[in-house]
Image (spheres, rainbow, N blue to C red):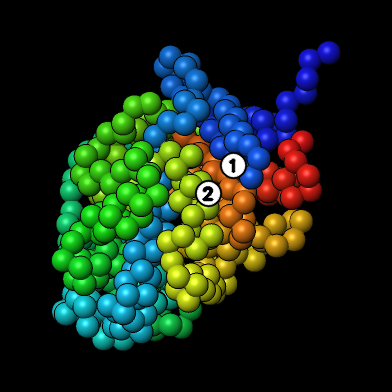
Amino acid sequence: MADQPSRLQRDADALRDSGVTGVSVRLQTAHAVRTVRSGVGDLATGRQVPSNGYVRIGSTTKTYVATVLLQLVGEGRLSLTDTVEHWLPGVVQGNGNDGRRVTVRQLLQHTSGLPDYINDVVPELSARGYRENRWTTYTSEQRVALAMNHPPSFEPGARWEYSNTNYVLAGMVIKAITGHSWEQEVQARILSPLGLTHTIAPGNRPSLPRPHARNYQQFEAGGPMTDTTIAYLPFDGDADGSLISTTAETNRFFTALVRGKLLAPAELAEMQRTVNVPDDHGVPAGTGDGLGLEWTPLSCGGGYWGHSGNGFGYLVWPAATPDGKTAVTVSVHSRPGDQGTAARQIEGITDLVDHALCDEREGGAR
């Protein structure tokens, strides 16, 4: 009788069965590394998903950017209570937006109330819109200017609401302080010290290095899958979500971060001070948002640190236990066209992560 597939494999297969074209998972423990794959990496050829291919990590980029800013805090070069106006005079203003009232902490924790520029750079949410607009490039200043055409969502500090504009501004603050781009500082302060040679800030280069799975976006419920492997540069090119990595290196980054290898205790504690994320944000109940780092509860008690990322046709979900002994990153290579299926797929991802981390705590994978 053939061996039954592990729960990790069964959970990956369940994601495939929910409509995801391709899935890759890497689980790193104190004793071993396990990888599982399901589905295909190319609908046209049927080839497998690479076991450790390059993936877009989207908003997971925000954790790297926040880490750099907190390192600068630790060096005494800025304070989390500094205003945006102090570092970027005149950038945040108009329609009720006021950089004099928004702090660096509020940027990093999405409590600034600043409007999100994303809808302004997606003029048509369709396959045609993707193809016609994917090559359009924007500077950080242009992205922020688009956001400033809208009023703030709320008074700074009043509540939480995710806005990519916050991290475009965070990248600009890094440059204002250091004289270097956020990409250069991430490279010098994180990637080089950790030996993360397969984590890349591509700028406006739209292609993924090889090997990689192809990404597919279903733009309408029941519609065809559109190949979206080429970046959508209007929102895939800045400090809010442009990094490319691998599941192995994503695990290594989060493991190093929670173990205190990148931040001193005081700054790591600031990063891990959370506010509640509303349940309607599509995350598990009880999720908290720190400074570029999210806390998610586990069914077996405790929880994990991470920060998901997504874009057209891809989603990554990294997770690391507080002691850094166990980490898992899930990468899926398609996104559905209806909200119900999207919610079920995210639930499948979070179930996989929950099972992997709880099973390891209870004595090993099943």
- Tell me the element at label 2: strand
In percent of width and height, residue 18 lies at: 61, 34
Mark 1 is surrounded, within 10 Å at the Cα level, by few (under 14), some (14 to 19) or many (20 or more) other residues, namely many
With respect to residue 221, does 3 lie above or below?
above
Q: Amino acid at mark 1?
A: Gln
Residue 264 quadrant: bottom left
Residue 363 quadrant: top right
What residue did someone put label 2 on? 318
- Tell me the element at label 1: strand
Q: Nearer the viewer, residue 256 or 131?
A: 256
Q: Residue at x 48, y 16 (%)?
A: 46
Would you say 87 lies left or right of 71 here? left
In percent of width and height, residue 59 lies at: 40, 54
Would you say 77 lies left or right of 42 here? left
**Residue 191 appears in the figure:** yes
Q: Amino acid at mark 2?
A: Pro
Q: Quadrant of the N terminus?
A: top right
Q: Mark 2 or 1 closer to N-term?
A: 1
Would you say 59 lies left or right of 336 here? left
With respect to residue 186, does 51 lie above or below?
above
With respect to residue 4, does 249 lie above or below?
below
Would you say 347 lies left or right of 207 here? right
**Residue 342 appears in the figure:** no
What residue did someone put label 1 on? 28
Q: CA distance from mark 2 to mark 1?
A: 11 Å
Find the residue positioned furthest to the right: 1
